[in-house]
Image (cartoon, helix red, strand yellow):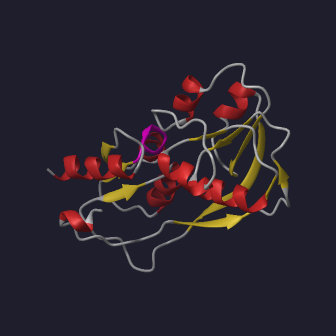
Amino acid sequence: MLESLGFDVILAPLLELEPIETGPIDLRPYDWLVLTSITGAKELRRRAVGEPRRVAAIGKATAEAWGGEIDLVPTVSTQEGLLAELPRPAGRVLFAGAEDARRLLSDQLGADFVPLYRTRAVRPERPLEGDLVVLASASAARAYAALEVSIPTVSIGPETTAAAKASGVRVAGEARTHDLDGLVEAVLSATA
């Protein structure tokens, strides 16, 4: 998307994802399945036994990655946004995602948590160069901070911004909507 707008884009992954093998995961006992990431949606779909009663996904891309019926995609693509829109009482909830995911959903809903993957920081093969770095997760913000580079950043949302700032990273902008469209808009604003 950024290239189509005339930006020179250099891909420099800061994370690698490693599945955590938990074996099959039975979805039938749950009233709600909560998906918070594309990777979590794909990993859970691969291991799922049975179909969930209802599914909530944070963000359109996460919903699409699930590949099945989605009952709720909150207007605000955060755990807080999902909590605000999830009908109560929610019943029994399964939250499956990254090993180091925030546990707000688990804490607020008493959800069962299953770690499906872990993130590991990686160093780019070449030193980072550019005018702006785009950060799409709190894990990426922490990995970027470890590189000790001073290029300003644009963040996908409040948790990523908080992780970046806590690590001493300068944040030039934050996406208003926590998705790819929001990131592109934030880049455009930061470079105007």
Left of 101 or right of it: where is 161?
left
Which residue corresponds to the image point at 60% horizontal and 45% vertical from the top-left? 36
Decide: is 36 above or below 106. Answer: below
Left of 24 or right of it: where is 173?
left
Splitting the image into 4 quarters, where does residue 47 fall? bottom right
Q: State which quarter of the image contains the N terminus.
A: bottom left
Which residue corresponds to the image point at 49% horizontal and 66% vertical from the top-left? 14
Residue 126 is situated, as x and y percent measured from the top left of the image, at: 39, 79
- Does residue 170 appear in the picture of this structure? no
Decide: is 166 above or below 109. Answer: below
- Residue 137 magenta-highlighted: no
Q: How many marks?
A: 0
Residue 17 is situated, as x and y percent measured from the top left of the image, at: 62, 65
Main SS class of the magenta portion in the image: helix
Magenta-tinted stretch: 156-161
In this view, the residue in front, 174 or 170, is 174
Residue 68 is situated, as x and y percent measured from the top left of the image, at: 63, 51
Which residue corresponds to the image point at 35% horizontal and 71% vertical from the top-left? 128
Residue 92 is situated, as x and y percent measured from the top left of the image, at: 80, 31
- Residue 158 magenta-highlighted: yes
Left of 104 or right of it: where is 50?
right
Q: Residue furthest front?
A: 69
In this view, the residue in front, 68 or 122, is 68
